[in-house]
Amino acid sequence: EEFARLDYLMELTSAIEDYNAVLARWIKMRKGELSLHIENFALSELMEIISKSVATFDMKGVTLVVKDTPLMVKADKALTLFMINTLADNAGKFTPRGGEVTVEAVDGDTFVEIAVTDTGVGMSSEDVERILGSKVYDATQIGRSGSMAANKGGGFGLMNCKGIIEKYRKTDELFSVCK
């Protein structure tokens, strides 16, 4: 049991270092110092990394289901991982004990949809509109009502995801389907 805890702490430390590296890339990209690193890769690589979070979800009493996929995408691997992980973490944070978070990829005609779904409380329609409809929004105003308020973070994860998607859309017509 002691080794399991040590392994978990080592994985957690490694994950934090990875997040910091991705955030550093994102900050540089926002400053115009770094461009997207677009490459073709198998989504199964990212799904495998996300599935390593299962212990964190288990500790909260939430089941994490990560569905493997043979699909390939053309994107920035690190930023795609950041977005999937942010959405999965948010879903886990707001899913009650006994609930489930699922991460999967669905093949569309001209795109691959990466879906993070959960059995949690969800966001209010006002919050969704604030995030999707505003060019700039106050992240502290998201999730202030109901049961979300107790677990609310700074809201920067979703804001960064939105910024990454906007960067993709501005980069190339290929990414016009991103949302």
Image (cartoon, rainbow, N blue to C red):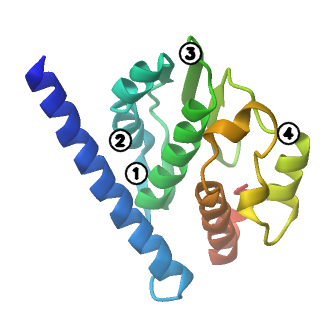
Mark 3 or 2, closer to the camera: 3
Would you name the residue on which mark 1 appears? 41
Q: What residue do we see at 62% from left, 25% from top?
A: 95
Left or right placement of residue 85 versus residue 1 in this view: right
Would you name the residue on which mark 4 appears? 124
Real-space Cα distance between discs 4 and 1? 34 Å
Real-space Cα distance between discs 3 and 2? 28 Å
Mark 4 or 2, closer to the camera: 4
Real-space Cα distance between discs 1 and 2? 8 Å
Which sits in the foreground, 133 or 111? 133
Q: Secondary structure at mark 1?
A: strand
- The amino acid sitting under disc 2 is Glu
Quarter where residue 141 is shown: bottom right
- The amino acid sitting under disc 4 is Ser
- The amino acid sitting under disc 1 is Phe
Q: Secondary structure at mark 2?
A: helix
How many other residues sit within 10 Å of disc 3, few (<14), some (14-19) or many (≥20)?
A: some
Q: Secondary structure at mark 4?
A: loop
Q: Are marks 1 and 2 in contact (CB under 8 Å)?
A: yes
Quarter of the C terminus within the rendering: bottom right
Q: What residue do we see at 66% from left, 65% from top?
A: 174
Above/below status of 58 relative to 113: above
Left or right placement of residue 169 versus residue 76 in this view: right
How many other residues sit within 10 Å of disc 1, few (<14), some (14-19) or many (≥20)?
A: some
Above/below status of 31 relative to 56: below
Would you name the residue on which mark 3 appears? 97
In this rendering, does residue 35 appear at all?
no
Mark 4 or 1, closer to the camera: 4
Real-space Cα distance between discs 4 and 2? 33 Å
Left or right placement of residue 57 versus residue 83 in this view: left
